[in-house]
Image (cartoon, rainbow, N blue to C red):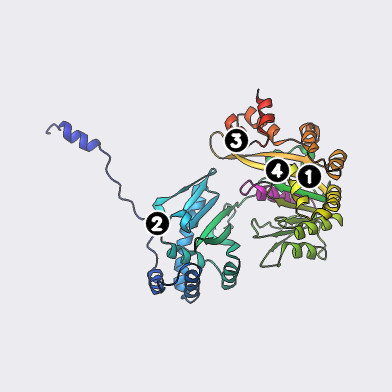
Amino acid sequence: MRPSSKKEDSEERKPQPRVRAPIVPPLPSIVETVIDSAPDTLQGEDRVRFLADQVNALLEKDRASLREHMRIFTKRTVDLGASDMDAGGMGCDGYFWYRVDGDKRRYEELGQYTEDELDMLFLNLLQERQMQVLFEEYSLDFSYQLPVEGRDGRRRRFRATCYFDNGHLALNMRAITDEVFALSSLDFHPSIEKGFMFRHVRDGLTLITGVTGSGKSTTLDAIVDANNEDVPAHVVVIAKPIEFMHDPKRCIVRHREVGKDVRTFKEGMVQCLRQDPDIIVCGEMRDPETISAALEITDSGHKVFSTLHTISAIETIERIIAEYPTDEQERIRNRLADVLRCVVSQKLLPKIGGGRILAKEVMWMTSSSRAAIKNNNANEIYQMMWEGGKMGMTTLEQDLYRLVRQRLVTPNSAMDFANNKRRLQSLMR
């Protein structure tokens, strides 16, 4: 055997370029045909409307082929363990982006697409009535079910938002978990867990708050499932869109989607009063009308859960009151103090070793906190939570410090997510 030269050895060690099979097949030829038929003079919304008309006129086999492309992109969300998928508009530069462990980045191996191509893919997901809402409001929230099976054999569901970005369509799809976390796994104090349960506390308003992506829906689903397994009752879930579908166990569980089963959150809640419910879950208190309906239903003796986009218990109270005109705020302040039971404000932090972990602030209503709200001294509530550990209360900073002590999050991450950094610094000295 002829000895190899140094040059040959070097070339053999050099990594060879990989020939990768395309992950995504080419788009159907009908896409190019439709786009080529669009007049160059049509731009922005007019162009999207033209494409919508063409999509509605496609043969079912062509629409099925487009849906298959979206199935590939959506299945990648599941394969990556991503929470979200984003595409479309100028902001994504033609790529599909995924959020994994809190970080969002583009996945170039899925290909790059023109804005027109993505417009057609997204429009093909919608029914004609949904397209009308999209053009009326320039944004559409909807649930979508794709043929990707979950752990329990259910088809995976996604919460989707389609909206305009610089004259074209953008899409966010959030994966809805196919399993419910046990309430006990969320590390609430036993007194707070007990307060969530209809068996022990049969009325009052509980609010789960946090920014988008902080796990509010996960917590609500855990609470609903715990009650569903514990007591014979009637639960009505009103949401836009409906996310996790609860099977009836010991409870009847109704799922009413705003825009499909009922027109508005407010109407859904008012209609509840004639449906003999025990527990009512309102997906979000978005406006004074919905807030008023929630307070009224709670006042009538029902147990109500809802969410708000706030980051602390104090901000939650102040936000609700501030939704009303000045001359009504005193009345709302007193009413809120009477019906509020609990506020949980939560955040998801990067966990040491990968993944994310829940940090939360918990306020349980006491006679002192009720008086603080009625006397417009909501700022006193922080100190009540700081000192209320025996009742299950905690400030966000105390819970962050707990996670640092348990070596679940880094001190730097805890400080980044703290609302009151000075208080957290004092704990970590």
Q: Earlier in the sequence, mark 1 or mark 3?
A: 1
What residue is rendered at 25% in x and 36% in y? 13
Dominant SS in magenta: helix
**Residue type (three-letter) at the residue carrying disc 1:** Cys
Report if residue 410 is visible in the image: no
Q: Which residues are magenta?
A: 210-231
Label 3 or label 2, whichever comes before in sequence order: 2
Residue 78 seen from this side: yes
Looking at the rendered structure, the kind of residue marked 2 is: Gln
Are discs 4 and 3 less than 8 Å apart at CB? no
Instruction: Name the residue at the left extreme.
Output: 2
Marks 2 and 1 close (CB-CB < 8 Å):
no
Viewer-proximal residue among 75 and 376: 376
Q: CA distance from mark 2 to mark 1?
A: 47 Å
Whether tag 1 and tag 3 are in contact, CB under 8 A, the answer is: no
- Which sits earlier in the primary sequence, circle 2 or circle 1? 2
Question: In the picture provided, is 201 more to the left or to the right than 245?
Answer: right
Q: Which residue is mark 2?
A: 112
Query: Which residue in the protein does label 3 denote?
Result: 416
| Mark number, residue 345 | 4
- Quick check: is 238 in the magenta stretch? no
36 on left or right of 149: left
Circle nearer the viewer, 1 or 3: 3
Mark 4 nearby-residue class (10 Å; few <14, some 14–19, many ≥20) = many
| Percent x, y of residue 144 | 57, 62
For mark 1, what is the residue? 342
**Alpha-carbon span between mark 3 and mark 2:** 34 Å
Q: Quadrant of the N terminus?
A: top left
Q: Amino acid at mark 4?
A: Ser
Of the numbered discs 2 and 4, the one sitting upstream in the chain is: 2
